[in-house]
Image: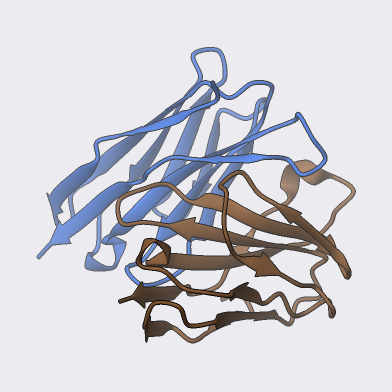
């Protein structure tokens, strides 16, 4: 069964600190992996996208890594800000159809305190 | 900021009422999607469309229906709302690209529905 598991479920950190969110998946055949940020009451916004040939991708203070062999990804946030408080969702796409079926994780709820 | 809009943002309605959730995008995207999301849970695809006059059911069984008469408009309708329909509904769109690996979905702000 294709699945996407994220950890931790929730995380609280102090402003200025770094943190790392984890994503493990069993989706096969693998096409790409995206990290989305979803602010409370808003729709998800894409942060990064990686294919199987890429093992790291940065977007400002966000750096995503991918190990396609172990089927693991991480999202590292550097020098956290209050505006980073949100749910971070890992989304994996397969190559099984023209739709590029997406498998969503439940997200990690990050809270940044001042 | 993606140009995709949903109305209403919040809706409280009684059981048995008919409701339509609106979704519009101005990016000219061919593909559009409806997702259902409960608090702390993953998004579930309930409907999608490849283009005008194309609609398909998603993974999650839903009593809702959709239509795609215009490229920019993808409304979702519940003929008779029930408390079990209480959830957040997210609309998204993506551009059909030759290289599907780079296809990214752009999400609207969502509609929070409460059925009493």
Which residue is more in the foreground, A44 or A47?
A44
Coordinates of residue A47 in the picture (x, y in percent):
51, 54
Q: Which quarter of the figure has residue A38?
A: bottom left
Q: Which chain is brown?
A: B
**Residue B106 vertical placement versus B20 (above, below):** above
Identify which residue is drawn at 44% across, 43% down.
A63
Identify which residue is drawn at 42% across, 71% down.
A42
Residue B107 in sight from this viewpoint: yes
Image quadrant in which the C terminus of chain B is located: bottom left
Coordinates of residue B85 in the picture (x, y in percent):
43, 64
Q: Which quarter of the figure has residue B38?
A: bottom left
Image quadrant in which the N terminus of chain B is located: bottom right
Furthest residue in direction front, as rendered:
B16
Coordinates of residue A18 in the picture (x, y in percent):
23, 45
Which residue is more in the foreground, A43 or B44?
B44
Identify which residue is drawn at 56% across, 47% down.
B60
Q: Which quarter of the figure has residue A53?
A: top right
Q: Colour of chain A?
A: blue
**Residue B109 vertical placement versus A10 (above, below):** below
Coordinates of residue B107 in the picture (x, y in percent):
57, 66
Furthest residue in direction bottom, as rendered:
B8
Furthest residue in direction top, as rendered:
A69
**Residue B109 vertical placement versus A49 (above, below):** below
């Amino acid at each position: 069964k294709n699945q996407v598991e994220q950890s931790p479920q929730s995380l609280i950190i102090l402003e200025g600190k770094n943190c790392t969110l984890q994503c493990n998946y069993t989706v096969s055949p693998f096409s790409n992996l995206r990290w989305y940020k979803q602010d409370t009451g808003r729709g998800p916004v894409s942060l990064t996208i990686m294919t199987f040939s890429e093992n790291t991708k940065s977007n400002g203070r966000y750096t995503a890594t991918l190990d396609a062999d172990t089927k693991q990804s991480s999202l590292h946030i550097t020098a956290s800000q209050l505006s980073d408080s949100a749910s971070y969702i890992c989304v994996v796409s397969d190559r099984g159809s023209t739709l590029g079926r997406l498998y969503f994780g439940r997200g990690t709820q990050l809270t940044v305190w001042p | 900021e993606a140009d995709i809009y949903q109305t209403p943002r919040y809706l409280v309605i009684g059981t048995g009422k008919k409701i339509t959730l609106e979704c519009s995008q101005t990016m000219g995207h061919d593909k559009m999607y409806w997702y259902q999301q409960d608090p702390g849970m993953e998004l579930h695809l309930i409907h999608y469309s490849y283009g005008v006059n194309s609609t398909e059911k998603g993974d999650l069984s839903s009593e809702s229906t959709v239509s795609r008469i215009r490229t920019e408009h993808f409304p979702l309708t519940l003929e008779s709302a029930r408390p079990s329909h209480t959830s957040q509904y997210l609309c998204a769109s993506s551009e059909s690209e030759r290289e599907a690996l780079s296809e990214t979905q752009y999400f609207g702000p969502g509609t929070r529905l409460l059925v009493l």
